[in-house]
Amino acid sequence: MSPEVGELNADVLKEKLQDETDRTLELMAEMVHATDPVLREKAKRLAASLVVQLSRENRIGSSGASQLVPSRAVHDIDVDASLEAIVQARSEGIAPNLDDLVARSWTRPPLAVCLLIDASGSMRGARLAAASMIAAAVSLRAPQEHAVVSFSRAPQVIRALHEPAGPEQVVSRVLGLRGHGVTGLRGAFEAARDQLAHARARRTVVLLMSDCRSTDDQDPVPAALQLPNVRIVAPAEDFDEAEALAARIDARWVAPESIAELPAAIRLLMQ
């Protein structure tokens, strides 16, 4: 996949991504830690692009973008939809009937998401690949309003809720994470609350990627209970604490067996 020092074969990576999705994503996540700075940057850019592409191919359902919907309120007239009524009225020398005109107005985005990434352990290989895939899925699912926050002892904002950073830029930032420290779940939930406080969306969701093993002696439950919709993505090999926390805060949770299953799992959690 790297024929020469500082070079990557994008075509080979794309082919392997189709045949061995999990293994290829793990290798790409490892390459972003390469000692060669040129290779490291190229690997990060390519990995971000391929992860977003893979997530986009697996995306189903509506996005969080504002959209135009038919309305009878006094807003902008949809000329195309109202053209027949306008022409008919003019031919009769009368004003169009308001009931025959279609107006359109901007609706609020249906969904705002804050993704919390547990970076308290080692952020390499499968774990880093999973984090990048989830970040891509979230950014595509709620493109207007999504925040990404990593946390160990304290939270760190990777993308603020209304920051104009696209999916590839967000994934690239996630791929740059380094894991360390204790697991501060309460601080993470409080950060999610702060990020979503100014959301315009009709519905907000907090998506937590963690084994939920809090190690800072701070009870996360009171902070989590202040949030209306908490969803948890736990590692398949270590989900007991996540299951227990989900039961205490009435949250839905999943523990996908493979990285390739993550986009579909995220879709189910967001429903």
Image (tube, rainbow, N blue to C red):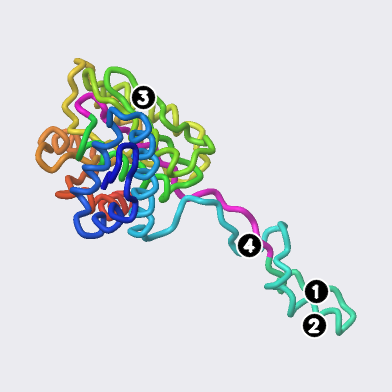
The answer for how far apart the CA atoms under marks 1 and 2 are is 8 Å
Which amino acid type is shown beneath numbered disc 2? Gln
The image quadrant of residue 214 is: top left
Front one among 92 and 69: 69
Could you say whether the residue bearing mark 4 is in a helix, strand or loop?
strand
Is residue 245 visible to the viewer in this orientation of the structure?
yes
Q: Which mark is residue 71?
A: 4
Is residue 228 visible to the viewer in this orientation of the structure?
no
Front one among 47 and 248: 47
Q: Residue at x 16, y 27 (%)?
A: 213
Nearer the N terminus, badge 1 or badge 2? 2
The residue that disc 1 covers is 96
Could you say whether the residue bearing mark 2 is in a helix, strand or loop?
helix
Which amino acid type is shown beneath numbered disc 4? Ser
Q: Which mark is residue 88?
A: 2
The answer for how far apart the CA atoms under marks 1 and 3 are is 53 Å
Nearer the N terminus, badge 4 or badge 2? 4
**Residue 105 percent location from the top left of the image:** 64, 56
The answer for how far apart the CA atoms under marks 4 and 2 are is 21 Å
Q: Which residues are magenta?
A: 103-122
Q: Could you tell me what secondary structure mostly forms the magenta stretch?
A: strand
Nearer the N terminus, badge 4 or badge 1? 4
**Residue 169 percent location from the top left of the image:** 45, 39
Nearer the N terminus, badge 1 or badge 3? 1
Q: Decide: marks 1, 2 in contact (CB < 8 A)?
A: yes
**Residue 14 percent location from the top left of the image:** 31, 55
The residue that disc 3 covers is 190
**Residue 262 percent location from the top left of the image:** 25, 50
Q: Residue at x 87, y 77 (%)?
A: 94
Q: Which mark is residue 131?
A: none
